[in-house]
Amino acid sequence: MIQLKPASKSGPGQAKPGHVNHDALFDCPELHGVPMSFGRNVEIYGEGEPAAYVYKVLSGSVRSYKVLGDGRRQVIGFHLAGDMFGFDCEAEHSCSAEAIADCQILLVRRTTLLNVAERDIDVARSLWTLTATQLKRAHEHSMLLIKTAQERLVAFLLDIAQRLSTKNELDLPMSRQDIADHLGLTIETVSRTFTQLSEASVIRFLASRRIVVRNPAMLAEMNG
Amino acid sequence: MIQLKPASKSGPGQAKPGHVNHDALFDCPELHGVPMSFGRNVEIYGEGEPAAYVYKVLSGSVRSYKVLGDGRRQVIGFHLAGDMFGFDCEAEHSCSAEAIADCQILLVRRTTLLNVAERDIDVARSLWTLTATQLKRAHEHSMLLIKTAQERLVAFLLDIAQRLSTKNELDLPMSRQDIADHLGLTIETVSRTFTQLSEASVIRFLASRRIVVRNPAMLAEMNG
DNA sequence: CGTCTTCTTGAGCCACTTCAAGGTAAGTGG
DNA sequence: CCACTTACCTTGAAGTGGCTCAAGAAGACG
């Protein structure tokens, strides 16, 4: 882990290549889907419920999570505009999903998708590719959870920055608590670590959820 | 977390229902595969290498893992007899795999499998199902990593016990270091926690890797 | 403006790590 | 069969990173 000293000089900004959402699953004419709105903190589906639909985020963002018996929560991941989610292979959802902010989501009947996949090899392949990508992301997340608090937050920022395709300014849709539960930390540690990064001039806060990356090279270096 | 007191009384043993390996992917006549032997600690494939094959464990066991730049290792999972692994959807393996002990492994060419999947919808479905199952397992693993040391080890024991389909006696194929790297702990903490479980009469050691579950109910309860 | 939620900061604590040493088991060669 | 080696595991003592508990600051909103 890289030691931070408050108030080091910051270099000029640096752009990151964008990330393309390559999957055309919902573009198939048979899988048009129904758009639907969800308010802030509204549950889209719950763990253990029958998996009736698969989903694509049109606008807004979504968190999927699991909770332990005593209330500890693990945010499995965040789904941003363009992301698809809810692709459990079993008949029941293995985690819950909630709207982080008001959002619009496209719903496609799971059975419809599976039927189309039986005939259309491209759809079947997309289904697999999509799941495999999520698997890879889950493995990355496991790597995250063995790192230090600072490394976790840095990796999180880099991941979100890449997925939002914004150059150096991030608008985090999620709360500190969501971030903490995603990174396996407490809200206090997340807050303190953000403050450290800010004091080291690696990032700067325009507001508590609006971040400017002042030193992208440093941020990348801190990711190891 | 459940507090352990050394030397509580233990109840009688209790059987666990077996776990069936449901996937018939390698039974397809076109996907016969080639058996191959790997010695202890021999690498089967490395992270970043071209994914030429997919694998099925015939005997022995395998660990798949990723390492960070500074050497920290995360054991993503263990593959026991009957398990299939190496199903990355990309052309390169996203993690490494090594034989834990001497083992025999069935290899099937990835391209062959993908070709068959293009024509045979059952194979395509298996491919998806298998990946989705691994995804679910990866999510479970994330849950593991937010728990206490004792909970992690208990969950690990329950998982292995179920997958080995042995009633109350486990023969762990992996070292303490492997377990530690799987659970995000140090080898010392794993050892100490094993000792606690033993002192509480939840388990008993026949040898350092041979464990008898003396109190399955307690073990299950400790898992939350 | 007050109220509510979210975020930040401080001080003390604890679970797990680190560092260090010793024990145990299996293999090897004499 | 025993000395020696090596790998693996256990145990102890001290340190620490992140947690808990507590209070206050900063926004959001009616």
Image: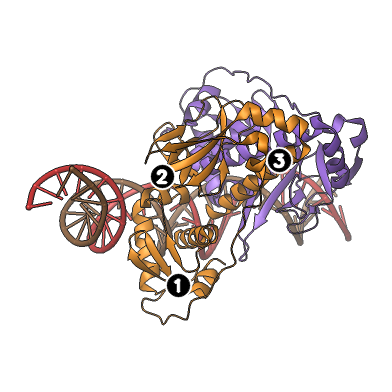
Chain colours: A orange, B purple, C red, D brown
Q: Residue furthest front?
A: A29
Q: Is residue B214 left or right of residue B66?
A: left
Contact check, label 3 and label 2, Cβ < 8 Å: no
Q: Is residue B153 left or right of residue B161?
A: left
**Please, which chain is the residue tagged with disc 2 on?**
A
Q: Earlier in the sequence, mark 3 or mark 2?
A: 2
**Res A128 label:** 3
Q: Amino acid at mark 2?
A: Ile
Contact check, label 1 and label 3, Cβ < 8 Å: no
Contact check, label 1 and label 2, Cβ < 8 Å: no
Q: Nearer the viewer, mark 1 or mark 3?
A: 3
Query: Is B211 in front, or is B32?
Result: B32
Residue sitting at x 56%, y 68%: A16
Q: Amino acid at mark 1?
A: Gln
Query: Is residue B162 positioned above or below D20 on the image?
Result: above
Q: Earlier in the sequence, mark 1 or mark 3?
A: 1
Q: Nearer the viewer, mark 1 or mark 2?
A: 2
Residue sitting at x 81%, y 38%: B56
User: x, y percentage for residue A197?
Assistant: 40, 68
Mark 2 highlights which residue?
A: A100
Query: Is residue B210 positioned above or below B96 on the image?
Result: above
Q: Quadrant of residue A103?
A: top left
Residue B104 appears in the figure: no
Q: Is residue A39 left or right of residue B71?
A: left
Q: Secondary structure at mark 1?
A: loop
**Res A3 label:** 1
